[in-house]
Image (spheres, rainbow, N blue to C red):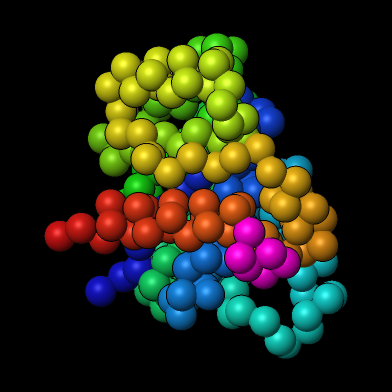
Amino acid sequence: MPGVIITLAQQKGGSGKTTVAAHLAAALALGRKSVAIVDVDPQGSLGEWFERREERLGEEGIDLEFRTASGWGARREARNLARHHDFVIVDTPPKSDIEMRPAIEIADLVVVPLQPTPVDLWATDPTLEMVAKEGNETLLVLNRVVRRALLSAEMEQATRELGYAVARTQLGNRVAFPSSMGMGSTALETEPSGLAALEVEALKREILKRATKG
């Protein structure tokens, strides 16, 4: 049985999509799952993260396989990797239907990160429309949430009113996320007992339940 393909998609830039992709992949791998990552974004941020990781750890650390692809090649690459891995995480670029669509088509689950602001919510519509056309299961994840902020609470309610599944787990606006990424690591590894790591673990469990049901 092939592995589960999870695509991270968001046409709005600055949503933290690559950070979520790296942390989800690491969380699954730390949970003894076989994980591959496909970077479809020409900017290559996930590739930069992976290279720093390799330079720092060498053959040590969690087992992650990394590939790059573009356009329709992402669909083929993800399918091939899914034959040999439990999970394939696909990171897509913003503002590119051509690059994003094949990665959405092949996904078992599309995870859409968004920040809790009106602009980010409005800008998410094109991504959701694209996913809806393909009929994929979708999970919205509120990212960079400022706790106890009135706007965050209002935007959480507005997000739920879109009619799509919204993750119960929210990722906070925590320094541990960008600081760990800069080292080619994740908050799960640099601060395993910290709030950022706990949030990622909770999100992983929620995604696992949704992506592997049935």
Percent across and percent down for residue 151 are: 55, 15
Q: Nearer the viewer, residue 203 or 196?
A: 196
Direction front: furthest residue? 148
Q: Which residue is drawn at 48% across and 60% down?
A: 201
Residue at figure coordinates x 36%, y 34% from the top left: 166
**Magenta highlight range:** 189-194
Q: Is residue 84 above or below residue 176?
A: below
Q: Where is residue 39? Give x, y as percent.
A: 62, 54
In terms of depth relative to the viewer, which is nearer, 99 or 89?
Answer: 89
Q: Look at 55% across and 42% down and name the residue there.
A: 171
Residue 26 belongs to magenta span: no
Q: How many numbered discs sit on the rendered protein?
A: 0
Image spot of residue 193 (x, y percent): 61, 65
Q: Where is residue 192 in the image (x, y as percent from the top left)?
A: 62, 67
Above or below: residue 132 compared with residue 119: below
Closest to the observer: 66 or 32?
32
**Would you say residue 193 sits in the magenta stretch?**
yes
Q: In the shown orientation, is residue 187 left or right of residue 11?
A: right
Is residue 178 at all visible to an observer of this figure?
A: yes
Q: In this view, does 163 lie to the left or right of 57?
A: left
Residue closest to the far bottom: 59
SS majority, magenta: loop
Q: Is residue 188 above or below residue 104?
A: below
Location of the N terminus (image quadrant): bottom left
Look at the image and tell me whether residue 41 can be seen.
no
Q: Give whichever of 161, 66 is nearer the camera.
A: 161
In the picture, measured across the screen, residue 108 lies left or right of residue 40, that is: left
Question: Which quadrant holds the C terminus?
Answer: bottom left
